[in-house]
Amino acid sequence: MKTFKGYRRANGNIGVRNHVIVINTAGELSSFTKKIAQLVPGVIPVIQQGGESQYEEDLKQTVRTLIGTAGHPNVSAALLLGIGENSIANEVKEYLQEQNHHVEALHFNKSTSIATLLKEGKDWLEKAVKKSKAEKRVTADVSELIVGLNCGGSDAWSGITANPAIGSFSDAIVNDGGTSVLAETTEAIGAEHILANQAINAEVGQEFLKIVNDYEARIRETGEDIRSANPSPGNMTGGLTTLEEKSLGCIKKGGSSPLREVIGYAESPTEKGFIFMDTPGYDVESVSGLTAGGAQIVLFSTGKGSPTGSPIAPVIKIGTNPQVYKMMQEHIDVDAGKIIEGLNTIDEIGEEIYQKLIETADGSITASEKHKNQEFAIWRLAETI
Amino acid sequence: MEKYYFEGYLRKEGTAGTRNYIGVVCSVICSSVIANDISSKVPGTVPIIHSNGCAQLGDDFQVTKDMLVGVASNPNLYSALLVGLGCETNQISGLLDSIPKTKPVEGIGIQQLGGGENTLQKGVHIAERWAKELSDKRERLPLSNLTVGVVSVDIDEESLEKVHPVVGKVIDSLVAHDATVIMGITDTLAPAGPLLSERSEKKEVRAELSNLGEESYRKRWKETNSKVHAARNFSKEEKDLAALEAKLAGTSTIKGLLAYSENAEECGLYLTKASSNLVETLSNMISCGCNIALVVSSRGTLTGSIALPSMTLTPKSADGGAFEELVDYMVTEEDADIQSRNVIEELIKISSGKKTALEEYGLGEFSIPHVGTTF
């Protein structure tokens, strides 16, 4: 039985990090989010640019993502910044406090001076950091882990090395009772029939085909061809020629386990095992959705080398070829290029990924954490009002 | 008529900056951390970072690209360093091709340079070189070199009643002094489209403005086709409030309705699309060529723009009633003519280098509107 040491939360969930965060519920508060986070060492600013004057579809998605992020098991405490009285910040706070999360909302309103607000924020964060430092890691089973699967800056090697190795890992953790969540609906286009056949039953298969079809329909409505954005210019210099080719490689991250559930952006899986989340191929938005859905760790394969991380979860970068590992070692944690060189098999790299995952869960720092890559963005649906 | 001047930085193409920044612009969110790191190491630079740049299609991508071209071209930037990842949709080479060659502009990429550390070093090297060239010398310029973005955000009826006589006169006076004024059409102002249309001499502008009062021109999820708009029926209350908000725009002739990132052809009053997301609206105004902004609200605002000095104006209320320390001008009961002159004088001081309240606090952001979903 594989275990790791994590932080047990009041609601029973287990985290692999013990972050204290400040998160804004309105784009207008981005600057103050940074300012308040800077007042107390170790506090992470989680900044998003939307949140105001949105159509209902975006508002719902924003609230769901904020709840999943501020209430994430890797978060020890979260300070939400809001404007005025009836803000999203209050809604999120009340929801999370009911579940015994350590959260507070700080409201910018006309009756309180900026200096007072900054002091209130600083005091709360200092206490939260102190409290977080007293929290100790405890042993937990890997079956409690949710691992997000993403790729960014793919090349022709992605589908041959890193993605199948991630698939091998995914099968292993699912076999151990854990959960892996494949994302990026765009990158299932052209290969959807294969994943649909992997579904546990016809209903899940149909749900999966529906999100892919809806995606394609939206693309057609823009009057554009998805092939003009994907494969991206970088994918093409990396040797990918069509979206189908990219997708066939992309879905290999899902391994061969049965697909048990299809969930919406930033939703939490209700089942264990292999899951699909409907996210865009835009990496930062996709990773933010995965973490808001409860993923404690994200695996991210890259052929061109991408530095992005997450403010919430450690992101483990898996290079697809020996060149990218050599060139961009500062951004990469696992070298799947060894498969090309004949040094390792796909399954051996899968095991290496599993080992890296356990080390990371135990507290070992990933490349993106080291470089403070804390990009965050919520998948945008419609235009701002 | 009194003649006004401000002290600005005259650029080669004849435009003028009210600030003299070196912009460090990311092409995509994936290079935002490095762009920010470069900026934090070189005084005189501003980080122009945002969440867009990849997995975008059609109009939505075009808006992102145009807005970055616009900000890089803005006269408040002495020079612009573009920082990319490499594999993104929004390629640095495409941006470089589109930015007019009137100032120092260079582009670097993380994948091309083999990682973040190298990119940071190279970027700092370029920015430091520019920082040495930077001259702090301002010169006396007429208001025809000023492009003022005016936007209202979160403003109620009571506040509008108090501020419109002053703001309206400010705009009319700026226009009379040959300044360019670009006013944002927010969602609350849109029902006044037909009313505003009467103030234009051009047939096509009148038609565009009339339409604003009849249909929503903001795209919804699952109806991304630009030809399909949700029909809207504005209530009498919405129309009345919009008519009041329209008084902020004074009485000058409306020369045109600018698209995102479109620059005004000549001086005078223009309108452009604005959202209640102030940062997005101000970013569009930079991109439309504004070199200063006037933000009108009931409560004051908690951020401004990273590269556009944003003067804030609210009504003065008995209970304090606003984030006072973040407000530059409070409208009182005093005569509107006198106050409009006060506002213009403050605007000129700010254009000449005086820091706005938001700048004093270091509150400034950049973000690009989406007109469709990401893929």
Image: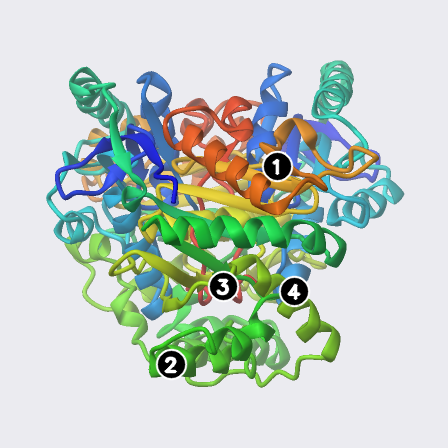
| Identity of the residue drawn at 74% across and 59% down | B157
| Identity of the residue drawn at 65% across and 30% down | A21
Q: Secondary structure at mark 4?
A: helix
Dots 4, 1 in contact, CB < 8 A: no
Judge whether residue B37 can be spotted in this image: yes
| Mark 2, residue position | A220
Which of B275 and B112 lies nearest the eye of the viewer?
B275
Above or below, B284 against B222 in this view is: above
Q: Quadrant of residue A159?
A: bottom left
Distance from disc 2 to disc 1, alpha carbons, whole Å, reads 39 Å
Above or below, B348 against B122 in this view is: below
Which comes before the other along the chain, label 1 or label 3?
A: 3
Dots 2, 4 in contact, CB < 8 A: no
| Mark 3, residue position | B251
Dot 1 amino acid type:
Leu
Distance from disc 2 to disc 3, alpha carbons, whole Å, reads 44 Å
Dot 3 amino acid type:
Thr
Q: Secondary structure at mark 2?
A: helix
Which-is-in-front pick, marks 2 and 1?
1
* Chain letter for the residue marked with disc 2 in the picture: A
| Identity of the residue drawn at 30% across and 33% down | B24
Distance from disc 1 to disc 3, alpha carbons, whole Å, reads 30 Å
Q: Residue furthest front?
A: B1
In the image, which disc is placed on residue B244? 4
Q: Quadrant of residue B112?
A: top left
| Mark 1, residue position | B302
